[in-house]
Image (spheres, helix red, strand yellow):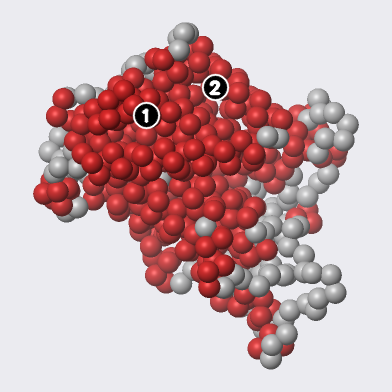
Amino acid sequence: MTRSEQQPRTQQPARATVGLRSYAPEPPQGSERFRWWSPGLLWAMSAVGSGSVLFTPRIGSEYRYELLWLLWLVALLMWVMIREAGRFAVVTGRTLLDGYSTLPGPRHWALWLVLVPQLVAAVAGVGGLSALVGSALAAELPGDLLLWSLVVLAAGLGIVVSGGFRAVSRVALVLALVLVSVMVAAAVGVFASPGDAAAGLVPGVPGQLDVPFVLPWIGTILAGSMGIIWFSYWTAARGFGGGTAEESEPPPGSEALPEAATTRRVAAWLRTMSATAAVGVVTGTVVITAFLVLGAELLAPEGIMPAGTDVADQLTRLLSDVWGEAGHWLMVAAIVTALGGSVLANQDGWSRSFADIVLLLRRGRGGDPASETPVEENGWLSRLLSWRPRGMRPRQALTILFATVVTGVLPAVVIVLVRDPVVIMSASGVVATIHTPFIVFATLAVNRRVPQPVRPGLAAAGAMALAGIFYTGFAGLYFADMAGLLG
């Protein structure tokens, strides 16, 4: 142990109401940091499939490059948001949702404000993505959109419930990375309007801006509101800062570090996590920009607007116009692999998050873990889990329950009733845009409660506030348009 690590513990400022994690391993140094970029790449591939594949070519077809500046601005704000979402878990060893439970006010108010809107977003998001993949399969195989959409839903649900998500998601991630690389190469090949693209980097509002048309796109650029929270889960699962508190144990026989030394290690982990967030955002932004280019260069000149139950067949024009029949099949493979992987990731991510929220609801005011009541002593939760087999942990049972009902049965009902992937996904995108301001400001409030040396600085806090104001403005535009105030 170095001399600096043997300094006495420093007393935390009074405003720090959430304690520093008890142990942090040595942070990676030099080229070792590259090995910690995987959560960023995983997040980027999941983000690209969250709706960007559907909505970005539509934006390119309608507005060409006029909103390129908005895409890159949202990307910059997204880097700020996911970096701050990861901060709480790295500093404290507790999940971000756990942090929300500590916010002052009525009991569990923040958790309820996450749970209720996200139940709607989960049903619409999983249903819309499944319908889009089903549309691609129905265009090439016997059977209609409804059949293949339900097959995709059932396959994803089976993988999540059986515990095979991690193995399958790794394969899907590699395939998606290859296929989106093809999309970028295609965009480079067809790019023929550098002047228009340069003009699109200058902020401006199109003359006939259709707010309901644009809003779902903004809500799904890189990630929806829940995708911001998922980044914190993935960095914790990878072990940033030592992972969650129950996983963060010092090596046997090692001496406990003074708090000042732990703080320095945590600060170094935060820098590594910030770089990982940047890798994810840059990767995702390059891919989404490629989809905008393809929409502007291929769809706009022919007046094609991907929509309806044949939307996937229309999207295949993005590559078939470049590479013919081979391009057509590459685009089908991209939709099935990238978006199919996103269906799986969303089913797993939402069900785990909802299970986490329900378990956190057992705690008393302030979210103190010591106030947590056992499942058997909690009437409503005990009844909710009365079906679970002996030996199954409550978290696993809740995950299976939410996966089955919220990301399985209910999306299937929505697909049967609506069928149009664009309409279903639009609902999820609108919820994401409207809900993002709350996620941003709640995360900022939580991070202001951690120890002073590892709190967000003035620049980071100001950037988060700016992100919250930005999304609040678009949510206000949406409601103003609904009320007929925009003419």
Residue located 79% across and 69% down the image = 251
Which of the 4 image quadrants contains residue 245? bottom right
Q: Is residue 381 above or below residue 304?
A: below
**In the structure shown, which secondary structural element does the residue marked by tag 1 occupy?**
helix
Residue highlighted by disc 1: 331
Q: Nearer the viewer, residue 20 or 255?
A: 255
Give the quarter of the figure containing the C terminus.
top left
Tell me the kind of residue under disc 2: Val
Find residue 348 and report its image quarter.
Answer: top right
- Between marks 1 and 2, how big is the CA–CA gap? 18 Å
Residue 73 point in image, percent of width and height? 30, 53
The mark nearer the N terminus, 1 or 2, is 2
- In the rendered view, does 215 fall on the left or right side of 171? left
Reply above or below: 266 against 100.
below
Q: Nearer the viewer, residue 204 or 51?
A: 51
Q: Secondary structure at mark 2?
A: helix
Residue at position x 68%, y 63% from top?
242
Whether tag 1 and tag 2 are in contact, CB under 8 A, the answer is no
Amino acid identity at mark 1: Met
Q: Residue at 64% across / 52% down in the picture?
A: 237
Residue 166 in view:
yes
Residue denoted by label 2: 152
